Amino acid sequence: MANAFRFVLLSFLLVVAPAQEIAGTWFTTRGVLELEGKPDSLRGRYGDNCTLTGTAKGKELRFEAKEGQVTLEAKLTIDKSGHRFTGEWTTANGKGTWRGWRHDPAAEKGKAPSVAGFWRTGWGVLELEQQGNKLKGGIGSQGWTTVRGDLKGRTIELTYESALGNGTFQLDVDSDGKQAVGHATWAQGKGALQAQRLEGHARKVTPKPGAIVAGLGQNRLVYWLRAPKTWKPGQSLPLLVFLHGSNYCSKPYVETIGSSPLGDRYLVVGIDGERWDESSAPGDPRQNYTYANFMGKSTYEGYPNTHRESPALVAELLEELQKQHHCSRTFVGGHSQGGFLSWFFAMHYPDLVQGVFPMSSGMTMQCEPDVFADAALRSKQRNVAIAVVHGRNDDVVGFSQGEGTFRSCQEQAFPILRLFANEAGHAFIALPWIEAVQWLETMSGSDAAALAKAGRAALDEDHFRDVMAIVLRLRAIAPTDPVAKELAAKVDEYADGDAERFTKALAEPGDGAWIDDFLAFRDKFEFADRARDVMAKFATLRAEHEGPAKKLFDAARAKFNKGDRDGGWSTYAELVRDCWASSWAPRVKRWIADRK
């Protein structure tokens, strides 16, 4: 498809000017295009020596190209300057916009605008200081790239220095000073560069009652903040932070959450990912987070420079906002891509949050509860309230992913844990996020009377795990409160019969036919006083099964990787049969059931 796009550009450009004037390098939203030829015989080269041919007539180019087995048709129009074009490509499977440009020497003679401030680019936010025609600043949120250069008319020329290498930027600014296009060069090559001015964004923004203000962290992450309509200067409120889905931004979520009952009692903050999708239309920025290679505090080894991906950057901004607004509590949620990211704050930065609510997401490997070795960190993780939110009819991120993260935390003894599920699909608005946040409020509260009331309500609804989480919190903040003792005793009454039954089963475990019933018991009563002894005995049995289970799991995966699917499933079945008390067995059993 990219081949055809560049061919379109080549054809059109040659029709509006002599070939020798447009031949050379063009920078486009599909990459770098090298042009040569005449209007009736056009040639182009891009990518890995891909070539294009076509013709142009007047100011309109029509062409046909092949992308493998796909036929592509397109039209392009070049502007009056002869240095920018736009057009549309079409295939049987869809269509899209195609834009391109090259440096316009006339821009260097134009009236010099003010370019100081912040610009959104595909390299991150560009921050410029301007004194006359001299420019300096930095780009990106990682903190390792500085820029310095000159403004020549409407052309910005910068050199950049980075821990990852040096290079140059050149941008032609539009006459209104709001957009710019150009290119970047680096040791290995060159590529297109676009910029959109960030208007209204400032550091240390002051909340406005009932309004959304745009801010920038010290690390140049963009965020949006809404205060309740009743907010007064100096008032301290908790933070409700939300992280957007892929190719989106956080402001619409802030608008929705802010207009809900939650907006009356929180500073609602949405934080945009540091990666801007350069195809975004002005006024509709689309962003993405990075975290695939961030290993943080897990036992995995990281790759060079990945320690400055989104988890670290968002954590920095959280600390900044907490100090600036004197926030006592912070909840972090996220939808889809943002939901995956929100897990990092429960697992890698538990000191920063009291609760998280990942929505319509799964969990990356570096957030799995069993990949952390530090005892103090593991203890802090288990003090975070976790509300997993997912729709059973999600056709983007399957419900099994959300449920799987919930069960992973169950297997690793997270006490403050709840799955909020309904029959919705992937859409944020239809999910029970208000209920999830209200539950986080309750479970992380410090008012003994409110906790006691919530504990009794949870007992009435048979949410025994919630009851014991409240008991544990009461014991920590109000050791002499009699309600904790009362609630714990009532939970023990419910747990007593099964606790005795499973104590006997563990004395003679046999083939583990009772394991599913035990795990259901554990999910409810793991933290009950009456279950303490039986849980200790089960931990001993699990430790015996864990090593052999891991070997069988790895052996199964090796077979799958070699294409031996039957052998892999057979080894999984062996794991479930022989290592039924291991932490691996429940998830493998679910996979086997889903396969059927």
Image (cartoon, helix red, strand yellow):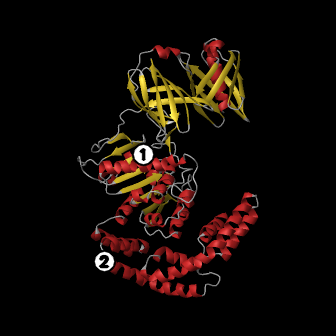
Which of the marked residues, 2 or 1, is nearer the chain's N terminus? 1
Q: Nearer the viewer, residue 406 or 102?
A: 102
- Mark 1 Cα-neighbour bin, 10 Å: few <14, some 14–19, many ≥20: many
Image position of 299 with respect to 78: above or below: below
Q: Are marks 2 and 1 in contact (CB under 8 Å)?
A: no
Q: Mark 1 belongs to which amino acid?
A: Ile
Looking at the picture, how far across and down is residue 189, in whole percent?
A: 62, 30
Looking at the picture, how far across and down is residue 36, in whole percent?
A: 68, 18
In the rendered structure, the answer to whether residue 157 lies left or right of residue 20 reads left
Looking at the picture, how far across and down is residue 69, in whole percent?
A: 74, 36
Q: Quadrant of the C terminus?
A: bottom right
One can see residue 363 in this view: no
Residue visible at 36% across and 64% down in the picture: 444
Query: Quarter of the image holding residue 468?
Result: bottom left
Looking at the picture, how far across and down is residue 563, in whole percent?
A: 76, 58
Query: Quarter of the image holding residue 328?
Result: bottom left
Q: Quadrant of the N terminus?
A: top right
Residue 22 marker: none
Q: Secondary structure at mark 2?
A: helix
In the rendered structure, the answer to whether residue 326 lies left or right of residue 137 reads left
Residue 271 marker: 1
One can see residue 475 in this view: yes
* Residue of label 2: 483
Residue visible at 31% across and 42% down in the picture: 211
Query: Quarter of the image holding residue 29?
Result: top right
Q: Mark 2 belongs to which amino acid?
A: Val
Image position of 314 with respect to 407: above or below: above
- Mark 2 Cα-neighbour bin, 10 Å: few <14, some 14–19, many ≥20: many
Q: Secondary structure at mark 1?
A: strand
